[in-house]
Image (tube, coloured by chain):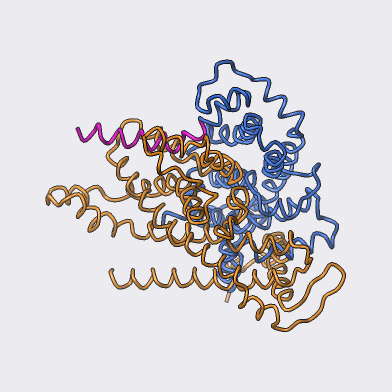
Amino acid sequence: MIRTGVDRQPWGAILAFLLPAFTVYTALTAYPVLRTFWNSFHKVLPRNEEYLGLANYAALVQDEIFWRAVRNTFTWACISPLAEVSIGLLLALALYARVPGMRFFRVAWFTPVLMSYVVVGIIWVWIYNYDWGAANALLRWLGLGSLVQAWIGDPKIALPSLVFITTWMWSGFNMVVLLAALHSLPSEVIEAAELDNCGWGAKLWHIIVPLIKPTLLNLLVLSFIGKMKIFDLVWITTKGGPLWSTETVSTYLYKRAFEWTSFDLGYPSTIATVWFVIVLAAVLALTWLFRTRDRLEY
Amino acid sequence: MGRILLFAVLGLFTAFAAGPFLWVATMSVRTTTEISLDHYAWPEKWHWDKFPAAWFNSNYNVYFENSLLVVLSAVAVLTVVGAMAAHCFARYRWRTNRLLYFVIFSAIIFPPQITIISLFQILVQYGLYNSLVGLSLVYIAVQLPLTVYILESFFARIPSDLFDAARIDGYSEWQIFWKVSLPIALPALATTVILNTILLWNEFLYAVVLITDDAKRTLPLGIQRFMGDQLEDVGMIATGLMIAIVPVVLIYAFFSEKLIQGMTAGAVK
């Protein structure tokens, strides 16, 4: 059989193209992940390491602050996607009817996503300031002075206040994505629904939502993953306080690894390992859940 | 009637989304004394001199330069390395192709915590802790999966006839990548460059762990330190924030479509 050059794979070229990427990946992603696993079974001090077996894991199970942080992070990761995506969808529908100045709104609403959490965090510390922050100023101006709060100083409402910030930040992003999805729909479908004279809510729920379902689910998962990682915003605004009410897994890990004077990197690595498994399991579960649903319907 | 209501809602949401930035912008040209009298007044006298003051007296020039160095070098390397890998995944067929692609791609969902502690150890071990080179290397690794993902999906759409033609013309594999693939992929490359620039410009977690030396701080760390130092000086912090915001806004003003494309890539199927 004669093989032409087109069929044979140029292994040299393939290797050369992949080598830089896999060098970086191996050295700075794969190896660190494995080293963190290894750390998690050890006490890791600057000069010596000591094998502990599962002692770190046993301690972690008992660690109330850790579980508090897990609860907070999960609360955040479950509420945020729903809030962001539904607000984003409503905004996208508002713009869908080709409102004049649509481009302007689209660009303006997208802006918060581009700012770093550090910038956003500082701005919102001011907005939540008890004496002169915009939140309380607005309430006083509306004559609702009784509702004035120490938004991020009160353990009861600190976490919702932070969730509100991420919702503010990401709703515009979801709107832009959903708007693109809506515009890619065949317009006959929506026109047909209008002819059938179905109500606004019915049209939304029975026609539009099923059509853009893949995009909706992607956005939910994306937002979920983002919130499972959250660190910067909390670090700038509350550092996990007051009373661990906004502690997330990231902030707790950072404190244990780099702020506590124990200098042990083993225990924080255990936190990282357990959290890694939890995040992976959650993402896989979500993807699986959404997949099977799709299959049932189509 | 419905239209008025619609515009009221749109207007309110715009004020809600953009208001905070406008507020910071007004405060950035007012002195703290003026601000404490009324936090929401329009600037009477525009104190532009606050910008050079923040820039020179608070080390902002150093932070800015560091950020620029780290981000630009990381993005340059990232684009080439990512494009090479993406081209390879999209162009050649071999048995472990999808497996290797998945290995890199799956790192997108890794929480940063899983690598951050070991990265700290590794960089200390190799003398790259507290160094801009070390931080750039980490940034390359962090953004690699997303870059390969965006570029691969673009390269995969280039018709393979084009490559066959180039090969018949006597192009080597490297020339095909450099002279055929890259020029066609320019729009996608631009998207990843802009996206990575903004994401890394804003990056905080890796920087806060891997940099402690004040002369090595990037802008987000600088702002955080600045806030810690000048806790009561709201006016000056606002000026500092504006300095960090302006480059992003400028990039956004010129490339808003590209940027939105990049940020939303992958979310739309």
In the rendered structure, the colour chosen for chain A is orange
Q: Is residue B4 magenta?
A: yes
Residue A273 position (above or below residue B1): below
Report the front residue among A92 and A60. Answer: A60
Residue A267 seen in this snapshot: yes
Image quadrant where residue A56 sits: bottom right
Q: Residue furthest bottom?
A: A53
Residue found at x 30% / y 41% = A94
Residue found at x 60% / y 35% = B245
Looking at the picture, how far across and down is residue B36, in whole percent? Answer: 58, 27
Q: How many marks?
A: 0
Q: Residue furthest right?
A: A47
Looking at the picture, how far across and down is residue B197, in whole percent? Answer: 62, 44
Looking at the picture, how far across and down is residue B23, in whole percent? Answer: 52, 30
Tell me which segment is drawn in magenta. Answer: B1-22
Q: Residue furthest front?
A: A146
Residue A223 position (above or below residue A31): above
Report the front residue among A260 and B197. Answer: A260
Can you say which quadrant of the picture contains the C terminus of chain B? bottom left
Q: Is residue B17 magenta?
A: yes
Q: Is residue B226 left or right of residue A99?
A: right
Residue B181 position (above or below residue A12): above
Which is the main secondary structure of the residues drawn in magenta?
helix
Q: Residue furthest left?
A: A196
Looking at the picture, how far across and down is residue B171, in whole percent? Answer: 65, 52
Report the front residue among A59 and A226. Answer: A59
Residue found at x 47% / y 62% = A75
Q: Is residue B231 left or right of residue B258?
A: right
Can you say which quadrant of the picture contains the N terminus of chain B? top left
Image quadrant where residue B102 sits: bottom right
Residue B183 seen in this snapshot: no
In the rendered structure, the colour chosen for chain B is blue
